[in-house]
Image: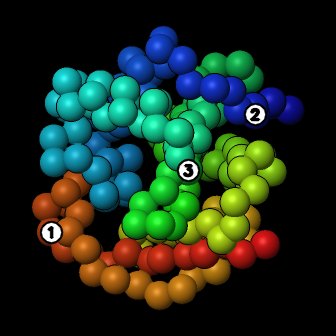
């Protein structure tokens, strides 16, 4: 059985994170990405900023000891939100669900919020399985798709 673990983000993870976030299908599913996900300078500046933000918790997800993705929480407009990204080559193995369950034990802030493109059934399933409840939807511009799309807003209270 595969071992899924969380560990702190280190400098050497930048290349793996950047590579993972270049996959066109992953970017399309995430939807709310930078205008140009191939802009390494912008990526590096963003990563440096979030790594020094005391309100942000970042972890790398490993699968049998190797890089599998990332998970984080951050404060936006007063709400603590969660985000995660799994390398597409590893989708469908339960990694996101296990990593989220582990992360929720570590980060005890409640309520905790999440957002996902409403057509991202996989991510919505992971969030609901962890106890997040849909609170509504809104239409927002998704740079990865170049258009406005529906986004589902979820909340975890307990």
Give the quadrant of residue 77.
bottom left
Q: Residue at (31%, 34%) from the top-left corner?
A: 46
Residue shown at the point (74%, 23%) measured from the top left: 64
Q: Which residue is mark 3?
A: 73
Q: Residues within 10 Å of mark 1 (few under 14, many from 20)?
A: few
Residue ID at (80%, 30%): 3
Q: Quick one: label 3, few (<14), some, or many (20+) residues within 10 Å?
A: many
Q: Position of residue 36 (x, y in %)?
A: 16, 41
**Residue drawn where x is 25% and y is 74% of the image:** 140
Q: Position of residue 88 (x, y in %)?
A: 48, 40
Whether label 1 touches label 2, CB < 8 Å: no
Image quadrant where residue 5 sits: top right
In the rendered image of this protein, does residue 88 appear above or below residue 2? below
Q: CA distance from mark 1 to mark 3?
A: 26 Å
To which residue does mark 2 refer? 4
Residue 86 falls left or right of residue 142: right
Q: Secondary structure at mark 2?
A: strand
Residue 147 is tagged as 1
Per the image, label 1 sits on a secondary structure element best described as strand
């Amino acid at each position: 059985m595969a071992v899924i673990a969380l560990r702190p983000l280190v400098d050497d993870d930048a290349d793996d994170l950047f590579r993972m976030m270049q996959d066109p299908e992953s970017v399309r599913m995430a939807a709310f990405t930078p205008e140009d996900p191939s802009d390494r300078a912008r990526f590096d500046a963003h990563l440096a900023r979030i790594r020094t933000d005391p309100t942000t918790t970042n972890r790398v997800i490993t699968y049998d000891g190797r890089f599998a993705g990332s998970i984080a929480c951050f404060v936006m407009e007063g709400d603590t939100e969660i985000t995660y990204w799994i390398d597409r080559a590893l989708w469908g193995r339960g990694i996101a669900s296990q990593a989220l369950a582990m992360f929720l034990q570590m980060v005890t802030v409640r309520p905790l919020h999440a957002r996902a493109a409403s057509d991202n059934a996989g991510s919505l399933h992971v969030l609901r399985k962890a106890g997040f409840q849909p609170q509504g939807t809104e239409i927002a511009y998704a740079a990865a798709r170049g258009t406005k799309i529906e986004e589902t807003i979820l909340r975890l209270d307990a």
